[in-house]
Amino acid sequence: MKRNLQLFLAATTALGLATAGSAMAEPHTDLTLGMSIEPSGLDPTAAAPVAIGQVVWQNLFEGLVTIDEDGEVQPELATSWEISEDGLTYTFDLRDGVSFQNGQPFNAETAKFTIDRIIAPDSINGQKSLYAAIENTEAPDSDTLVLHLSKPSADLLYWLGFPSAVMVEPESAPENATKPVGTGPFEFASWKKGNEVTLTENDDYWGEAPKLDKVTFRFIADPQAQAAALTSGGVDAIPEFTAPELVAQFESNNDFDVVIGTTGMEVVAGMNNTKAPFDNVKVRQALMMAIDRQAIIDATNAGYGTPIGSHFSPSDAGFEDLSGVLPYDPAKAKDLLAEAGYPDGFSFTMKVPNRAYAERAAEIMQAYFAQIGVMMTIESSEFPAKWIQDVFKDTNYDMTIIGHAEPLDIGIYARDPYYFNYSSPDFDATMAEIANATTEEERLAAYKKAQEILADDVPALFLYAWPKIGVWKAGLEGLWTNEPVPSNDVTDVYWSE
């Protein structure tokens, strides 16, 4: 009896240890990810703000194609495609067996609905102009989508991988801003306004299941609070850490990984080009030569970032370093002002969004401008709501500063209307060359020409390309190092320990 009891106790002890060991070995499948800006809605096809895509792109919504971490176009809901020799017809073969998270099927009709909605006259898609070449669509069968273009558009396939072109389901489309429905590996669970959005695994996902069961996107605007949330465990990762001056404390802490990459975001000080004195190119050139871009990067971003001389990032193919076209030279800047008719300088107001990087840069620029007799008043503008209304929509401003995060977006200077109010027939013609390019060499050559035009005309003060500063807990794997598209793609993220 005693021996049986001893065997029983040994067995139950071993079982208990095994159970405890199993519990200890149970994988960590939750992730809390910190972001600076809370999105205004969750439908990237109905609004422009980048924060929307940073929550839902690839995680909840998917497109015909996607863009990988290397900036390459890859198949997604379309398995393949053909482009006609004249560049006017795109034919997509669609993936079978895909359903939206409300159970409705994805097919050519829903793909047609999505594209038609983007290009419709009453479309509110923030990137509608990118798809303007699409004249009409057809769905000859359930697995085939055909796009007919009015003119060639060499970058169209790339743009179809953007958040603005994700596939939506017709019945749920009107509610996607608050209750999004997509085809992705995660589905919408909740949104606590002012705090967080939670996504959970989509059990019926058509592709490989994600390694995470739940992802919470927590919104923390203050950089100091971001650092505190990381150290306290309130968040596991901040892929775009906005306190570069605090990076060193995490680099020296073995509990964290610090990963520095690149982004396609250009920080520029846009000017209202139809408003005096900014309608004078010599004034714009003078202001460009009045500031030391590297000093701004050092003082505002702890040295992280790359000076630029045009609206192009080093992460973009065809990048040309034009920061030396109008280098820091305050004496030359004063001469240019005199030639433009402003020997004693002038005064103006900069509307600055209440983002840390913009506020810091504005203060330094204010000091630089004062050295050439230009007095700048800083007016804080709440971002995104008030800034978007005053600057982006009403163009009620002299100068502003903002990071343009959409990838390969140099074409914004050809948009009419757009908040710069910039007009250049040469630049417009060059953008047409890009669209009509039939080879990659022609396309990149035209992009270089476009960069050079902007470097001379200076419709905005080109400051620097934004770095991607990632800080996350050691053992977290799969987050992107570089960011060709603004995103927080967590579809391949997992905990290794």
Image (cartoon, rainbow, N blue to C red):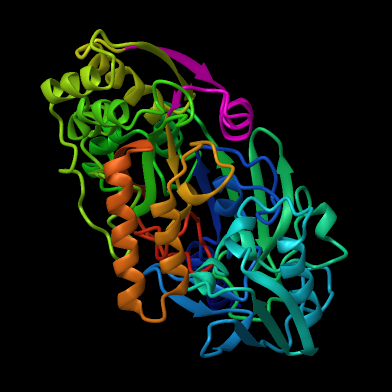
Residue 206 in view here: yes
Residue 120 picture location, percent across and down: 77, 61
Q: Quarter-wise, where is residue 61 in the image?
A: bottom right
Q: Is residue 216 magenta?
A: no
Q: How many marks?
A: 0
The answer to whether 78 appears left or right of 153 in the picture is: right
Quarter of the rendering occupied by the C terminus: bottom left
- Find the residue positioned furthest to the top: 344
414 vs 14, nearest the viewer: 414
The answer to whether 15 appears left or right of 461 in the picture is: right
Q: Quarter-wise, where is residue 430 in the image?
A: bottom left
Residue 126 picture location, percent across and down: 64, 50
Range of magenta residues: 375-400
- Find the residue positioned furthest to the right: 171
Q: Which residue is drawn at 50% across and 17% down?
A: 380
Examine the rendered structure and indicate whether residue 229 appears above or below residue 214: above
Q: Does the magenta stretch include residue 392?
A: yes
Q: Which residue is drawn at 77% across and 48% down?
A: 178
Residue 7 picture location, percent across and down: 54, 78
Q: Residue at x 44, y 51 (%)?
A: 425
The answer to whether 497 appears left or right of 218 in the picture is: left
457 vs 440, nearest the viewer: 457
Examine the rendered structure and indicate whether residue 198 appears above or below residue 39: below
Examine the rendered structure and indicate whether residue 373 appears above or below residue 31: above
